[in-house]
């Protein structure tokens, strides 16, 4: 069983646990994943599994997670712990505008909202600042929003140029949006005495790359394949308008042209805002990786682009690994891999509509 170390929120080592019923580690490329743990109540160190404490599976510092949910009955305790990137869901983006390489924009957003927050105060503090007896605002502006243990990895300036405007949306959602637009991943790892926000770039392990990785039943390295190839949400030409001015983004024609429209807020760049409304055909494939010639975390990992083949379905595609789920049980370990983008759920669609209407 993979050992789990438990740390306090101040990164003090509290315990190590390796006797549990099951451990599921879900890693995601565009956003943060989570750890699900099931353990008997009578096991050692169960008392250390409280909300706010941090779990470190083995030495996998990129999969460290913070406990946020506990359920129990007389025998069993169930833990849900989002990975450390979930800290970014605890901050909203106060009004700001940043343009630059995708990695630079992501790190500047995190810096301005969590590491060195020097923007106007969160809305909930405005009342306190208006009181005549409240200390000078500059004294209190930074500590309230600062993650004291968080720092930024060096900025390598990777990714295409993007522009983002802050309007009190959750920071994690904006990081996910940039990730999906540019293909870069992000997360927070457990470092020496602190937490480090990082941006990741996957490797090209497709059939056209230098180190091709191919998942196919013919190679006996996948089981239980399930795939979706959907045009139901496709929009490859989008009109964007504000008032009487309308622009067109994208190109296609005839029966392969899927049009859409998006209203552009007056303070947004019309072309860039409209471009983000384009929706490609959704392709996703889920499978259990069962070894073969390619070894997980050595030959391929989360974020890499690999080649998927299934001659029976007539499929050969290059797709990014967007999710990996590691399942640990007594005498058993399994890896489930998701390639490509998952179709939007009903909740995703509702969130998208709320965002479109400008409701927070």
Image (cartoon, helix red, strand yellow):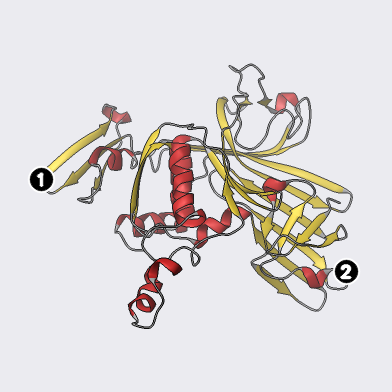
Q: Does residue 106 appear to the left or right of 164 in the view shown? A: right
Mark 1 Cα shell of 10 Å, populated few (<14), some (14-19), many (≥20): few
Q: Does residue 123 appear to the left or right of 50 in the view shown? A: left
Mark 2 Cα shell of 10 Å, populated few (<14), some (14-19), many (≥20): few
Residue 70, position as x, y percentages in the image:
69, 71
- The answer for how far apart the CA atoms under marks 1 and 2 are is 67 Å
Cβ–Cβ under 8 Å for marks 1 and 2 = no
Place residue 125 in its image quadrant: bottom left
Place residue 78 in its image quadrant: bottom right
From this viewpoint, is residue 230 visible? Answer: no
Name the foreground residue: 228 vs 139. Answer: 139
Q: Residue furthest left?
A: 244
Residue at numbered disc 1: 244
Disc on the earlier residue, 1 or 2: 2
Q: Residue at x 41, y 76 (%)?
A: 135
Q: How many marks?
A: 2
Q: Residue at x 89, y 49 (%)?
A: 331
Vertical placement of 243 versus 209: above or below? below
| Residue 43, numbered circle | 2
Q: Does residue 273 appear to the left or right of 207 in the view shown? A: left
Q: Residue at x 49, y 31 (%)?
A: 158
Residue 338, position as x, y percentages in the image:
61, 40
Vertical placement of 315 versus 226: above or below? above
Residue 219, position as x, y percentages in the image:
74, 24
Query: Element under label 2?
Result: loop
Vertical placement of 350 versus 104: above or below? below
Q: Does residue 111 appear to the left or right of 64 in the view shown? A: left
Query: Element under label 1?
Result: loop
Name the foreground residue: 109 vs 241. Answer: 109
Image quadrant in which the C terminus is located: bottom left
Name the foreground residue: 337 vs 129. Answer: 129
């Amino acid at each position: 069983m993979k050992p789990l170390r438990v740390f306090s929120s101040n990164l003090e080592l509290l315990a190590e646990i390796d006797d549990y019923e099951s451990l599921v580690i879900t890693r995601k490329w565009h956003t943060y994943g989570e750890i699900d743990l099931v353990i008997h109540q009578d096991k050692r160190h169960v008392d250390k599994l409280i909300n706010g404490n941090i779990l470190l599976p083995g030495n996998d510092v990129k999969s460290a997670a913070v406990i946020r949910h506990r359920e129990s009955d007389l025998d069993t305790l169930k833990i849900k712990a989002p990975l450390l990137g979930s800290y970014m869901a605890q901050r909203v983006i106060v009004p700001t505008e940043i343009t630059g390489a995708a990695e630079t924009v992501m790190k500047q957003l995190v810096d301005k909202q969590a590491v060195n927050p020097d923007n106007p105060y969160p809305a909930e503090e405005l009342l306190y600042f208006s009181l005549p007896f409240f200390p000078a605002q500059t004294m209190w502006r930074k500590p309230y929003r600062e993650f004291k243990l968080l720092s930024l990895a060096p900025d390598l300036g990777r990714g295409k140029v993007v522009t983002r405007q802050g309007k009190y949306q959750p920071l994690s959602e904006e990081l996910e949006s940039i990730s999906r637009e540019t293909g870069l991943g992000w997360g927070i790892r457990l470092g020496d005495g602190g937490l480090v926000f990082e941006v990741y770039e996957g490797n090209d392990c497709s059939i056209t790359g230098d180190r091709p990785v191919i998942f196919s039943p013919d190679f006996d390295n996948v089981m239980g394949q399930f795939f979706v190839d959907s045009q139901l949400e496709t929009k490859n030409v989008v009109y964007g308008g504000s008032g009487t001015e309308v622009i067109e983004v994208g190109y296609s024609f005839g029966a392969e042209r899927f049009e859409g429209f998006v209203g552009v807020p007056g303070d947004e760049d019309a072309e860039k805002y409209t471009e983000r409304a384009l929706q490609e055909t959704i392709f996703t494939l889920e499978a259990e990786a069962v070894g073969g010639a390619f070894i997980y975390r050595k030959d391929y990992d989360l974020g890499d682009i690999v080649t998927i083949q299934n001659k029976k379905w007539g499929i050969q595609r290059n797709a990014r690994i967007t999710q990996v789920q590691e399942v640990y049980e007594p005498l058993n370990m399994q890896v489930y891999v998701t390639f490509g983008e998952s179709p939007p759920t009903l909740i995703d669609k509702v969130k998208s509509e709320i965002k479109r209407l400008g409701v927070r």
